[in-house]
Image (cartoon, rainbow, N blue to C red):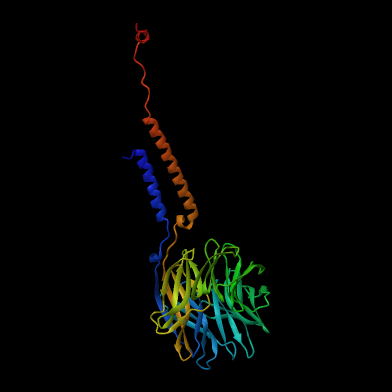
Amino acid sequence: MIGRGKAGAFSTILILIIAAATLLPAGADDEEVSVNWLVEGNPGFFFDIAFSTCESGPHIYVAGFDSSTESGVLQMRVEKRLKSDGSLVKNWTYMPSEYGGLLYGCTISNNRLYAVGASYSVNYSSWVILVLDSDLNLLSYVNLTEIPGAAISAFSDQEFLYVAGISATGLSEKVYVRKIRLSDLSLVKEYSSNLSAVNYAYDVALNPVSNQLWVVGNVNSEKWRVEVLDKDLNLVKELESDIGSSATSIGFDDEGYSYIVGDGGVLKLSRDAGEVKRHVQPVLFSKTLWLNDRLYVAGGESVGDYVRQVLYVFDRELNLLNRTVVSTSMDADAMFLMGKMASDGENIYVAGLAYLGYYDYEWVVYSIKVSSYKAPWYVEHWYLTLILVAVLLAVSALLLLLMRRRRRLRQTPREEPSTETGEQQAEGMRPVG
């Protein structure tokens, strides 16, 4: 039979073990991903492709291009849709030249939509930056003919617009980043990579913890490349990875870790750009977004007879928690390409394309409901929790040891005091004779 003290100590240890087991984060079965709605659009002939989404209030905005129904030339296109059901509110198209143009990225700041892309001429393309109001009225259009190439990705810190893309001069194609004042779109600072090799930039984003810009792309379409800049566009660090041929998107968690995706895998880096972990998988990961303690990645892979659009969900340690094929309702190959996806905290809005055959592509836009999971504090700070559990176990072991010693002391026989009188003692001491 176990004594009360020992039983209490065992109970304490058992409770702690059970508590430690409950600290494990939710598994894949707890991750909920479902498509709220899917809309397909085929506004023009041949090539109609959507790249980026951004959101504001009850609306989402989608940036890309379509083929003019009059000439078949590519033209810039922005759609405004309702978040509730995806219905089209308004669309805006613009033909920048007789050779056409397109948009790759968009971001919203102060109720204005900033979109970036390229305008084509007979010999080359040049950077384009434009501003629309919330009703898709054109407020400003800047064709940076001095920068041949294409503007691909942008974000704003409410004061400046940061744009990354490709600068192509002769046989040289390099990463180019421009810092622009929002008030008048004037140039503040610019950065150009110093590589002799061909290198592209596909995404730029701000690390909310380090307050640095991260630019991701590739070198010669053979390696991933990452360039970290301060907000004055001074180079802080650069690195390359052989995980795949090109990185296309980047996201950050609340601790400042970066998650970079591209063909072939996902890479987790520390704030100083040191590799922490990688997830390697032979699929095309195209876009990423950190939300509610989860990493959401839009990509694609072959499923049955089609190439399908897929949303993957990872935890901080790049464990794959959920994989949902979102394009199962379409009898067509469908893909997500580069470009940003947006979220309002409960839903993810992402755009891509579907191939209908005979060189005909259409826009595909999704609203996807995701789990609002937020890790409890003891999971988010698991290392502190483990220290606390270890201390409690050590204290419990010490209490158990003390109780055992006390129990032994109680069980040790004691000498009973003598009841004989002094005279009896003396008499007992007399010799017998």
Q: Position of residue 298 (x, y in %)?
A: 47, 74
Residue 182 visible in rendering: no
Task: Locate the C terminus by quadrant.
Answer: top left
Q: Nearer the viewer, residue 181 or 45?
A: 45
Q: Is residue 343 left or right of residue 148?
A: left
In the displayed structure, 92 sits above or below 267; it is below
Q: Nearer the viewer, residue 274 or 371?
A: 274
Q: Residue at x 38, y 48 (%)?
A: 14
Q: Residue at x 44, y 61 (%)?
A: 374
Residue 207 visible in rendering: yes
Q: In the current view of this chain or complex, which residue is farthest to the top?
A: 433
Q: Is residue 1 left or right of residue 175?
A: left
Q: Classify residue 267 by image quadrant.
A: bottom right
Q: Residue at x 44, y 88 (%)?
A: 356
Q: Position of residue 280 (x, y in %)?
A: 50, 71
Q: Position of residue 418 (x, y in %)?
A: 36, 16
Q: In the current view of this chain or complex, which residue is farthest to the bottom?
A: 71
Q: Nearer the viewer, residue 96 or 387?
A: 387
Q: Is residue 363 left or right of residue 174?
A: left
Query: Count the marks: how many?
Result: 0
Task: Locate the N terminus by quadrant.
Answer: top left
Q: Position of residue 72 (x, y in %)?
A: 52, 92
Q: Classify residue 186 by image quadrant.
A: bottom right
Q: In the current view of this chain or complex, which residue is farthest to the front?
A: 433
